[in-house]
Amino acid sequence: VVVARDRYAAADALEAVEVEYDPLPPVLDLEAALADDAPLVHSDKGTNRCYTWPLATGESFEAVRQRADVTLKRRYHQQRLIPNAMEPRAVVVTPIAASGEYTVYSATQIPHILRIMLATVTGIPEHKLRVIAPDVGGGFGSKLQVYGEEAVALAVARRLGRPVKWTESRSEGYLATHHGRGMIQDIEVAATREGRLLGLKVDLTADMGAYLMLVTPGIPILGAFMYPAIYKMDAYEFNCTGVFTTRTPTDAYRGAGRPEATFAIERIMDELAAELGLDPVELRRRNWIRHEEFPYTSIAGLTYDTGNYEAATEKALALFGYDELRAEQRQRNERGDTVRLGIGVSTYTEMCGLAPSRVLRDLRYAAGGWEAASIRMLPTGKVEVVTGTSPHGQGHETCWSQIAADVLGVPFEDVEVVHGDTRSSPQGMDTYGSRSLSVGGEAVHRAATKVVEKARKVAAHLLEASEQDLEFTDGVFAVKGSPEARKTIQEIAFETFTSHDLPDGVEPSINAETVVDPENFSYPHGTHLCAVEVDTETGRTRIRSYVCVDDVGHVVNPMIVEGQVHGGLAQGIAQALYEEAVYDDEGNLVSGTMADYLVPSAADLPDFVTDRTETPAASNAMGVKGVGEAGTIASTPAVVNAVVDALRPLGVTDVRMPCTPERVWRAVKEASA
């Protein structure tokens, strides 16, 4: 570790550091890494196999394979992705000598988890650590992590008794911030000749990188429950093998296991449709869970509470002009156009709102899935909402203010949201997995409801009425039949402050707090449709139109939902067409800058047509579902399905992501050879 008064002196000092390395052979190929004679990433382990995790439900897959009319096997590659938050990681640690305390400012998604982990690894008592996550410029899972630099900064500040700052450069982030995805998916389906799914078999080989970070081994397993997606079947078999390699560790990246699962099932559904001569939408209709069948327990063991796949799909098809585009596609194919039209379909659901603590226990996750919130009614009528979630661009302050204002009946402008500081918000499980609204927002809703009920007792006393005779509307308690007898909740807040006339046995406060442990995941769903034009002579792919209809339950703020969907689409399309972390044969990252790793700009993306259906969740009082990952989960298979659909008449059945012009061009040439 080099410590200096400024980064320039630190850079000069680094030049004076010489390290002697004994190069070892790189371990890069996932399957070769499992061979008995493979070089070892960790010599003390004796193998590069990190773990094997199986799941089998329903009938045996072998049994349904025997009675199936059609079986299909496909292999898909999930390339590594490098997160690109608007700001890189940074940490500042300030020691407070008089008290032996430390304040840690970190660009993190998880201030509460970070505090616990720093206490664990340094031995500093947790109550002597204060972690603050200020306005954080994006995360996408890359800041759902406890990084070595955070612990090192704390250790240096402890040693020197001086404030310490560390900020990574973008190129350092490409090398040292964890990566996403990185796996081989071997998929097999069994079906009848009429197109009914009988079974699904999934074998994953997942790249852990060189070390296990916070939830590295759990990311592929999160997807285990989503490979069956929205479909009914009789057998499901899943097996995941985690493999150590000499690359940057992988961990959570927007969607975390769910995009990979959706990609695999939606790609092979298109392949099955082609094999059976069915329209891809029709095949999905024959297999999805119908709206009247909810709640429905999937073959993977999850209970989907609500949904209406038919409504979302029909709306998307109408907005997209599906039949007209299919007619144009046939005409182009008959003419033998060099620029082919392809249509991609992707239907999805996801498990989000992480999650019931007992489920996380069974997955060996080291923490719970609860979330905390409290409401403080100030004497002047203003409201403080304290939340354990920690936003990094999702609009929590806006939405939480709306939730509290609606329940309490106070002006939106009178609500202040406090977050991201373990001193002012001591309880929380932070932000990831599309859990903020369905768990954190639900906690705010319940806390506000408690405030109303506590205020009702005081109001009944002051109005000399029974609690049952009080109506509460738009922030006002009124006696039924006597509208002139009324008290606002803000007046009640002042009355409890003075405490001059409270009922016997009632404490002088209407503040309330709650901790919510969700009873189930939430299950948003939707249908995404993509039309692409693929130039068979150059391999260039252009997205001509993109339509998505998502169902995220009750919508609190439509503008924020729209922004989340747009951002998710950008990241999912980026995986399909543009982004890939590339290593050379020696294990060096050669896509280590923005000049080598293509992050699409607005100019590279199409206009999106977005819409919604609304099926409220049954698992929480607000009826909300997650939206933060939906666009990323659904868009990647929609785009790749469209590319393959355009080239299928030429004999192409797959293009490995990202579908760059060169890869598309080579796929066409190889199919025609």
Image (spheres, rainbow, N blue to C red):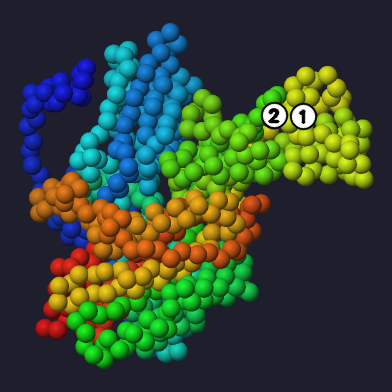
Marks 1 & 2, CB-CB < 8 Å contact:
yes
Mark-to-mark CA distance, 1 and 2: 7 Å
The structure residue drawn at horizontal position 17% and vertical position 46%, both measured from the top left corner, is 592
- Name the residue carrying label 1: 491
At mark 1, the secondary structure is helix
The front one of 530 and 634 is 530
The structure residue drawn at horizontal position 37% and vertical position 46%, both measured from the top left corner, is 141
The reply to whether residue 545 is in sight is yes
Disc 2 marks a residue whose amino acid type is: Gly
Q: Is residue 527 above or below residue 456?
A: below
Q: Position of residue 251 (x, y in %)?
A: 33, 48
The reply to whether residue 427 is in sight is no
Q: Quadrant of residue 644?
A: bottom left
Disc 1 marks a residue whose amino acid type is: Glu
Q: Position of residue 50 (x, y in %)?
A: 29, 51
The quadrant of the picture occupied by the N terminus is top left
Are there few (<14), some (14-19), or many (20+) residues within 10 Å of tag 1?
A: some
The structure residue drawn at horizontal position 74% and vertical position 21%, both measured from the top left corner, is 497
- Name the residue carrying label 2: 381
Give the left or right position of residue 124, taking residue 169 as reference: right
Q: Position of residue 86 (x, y in %)?
A: 32, 42
Give the left or right position of residue 37, taking residue 125 as reference: left
Q: Position of residue 229 (x, y in %)?
A: 46, 68
At mark 2, the secondary structure is loop
Are there few (<14), some (14-19), or many (20+) residues within 10 Å of tag 2?
A: some
> N-terminal of the two: label 1 or label 2?
2
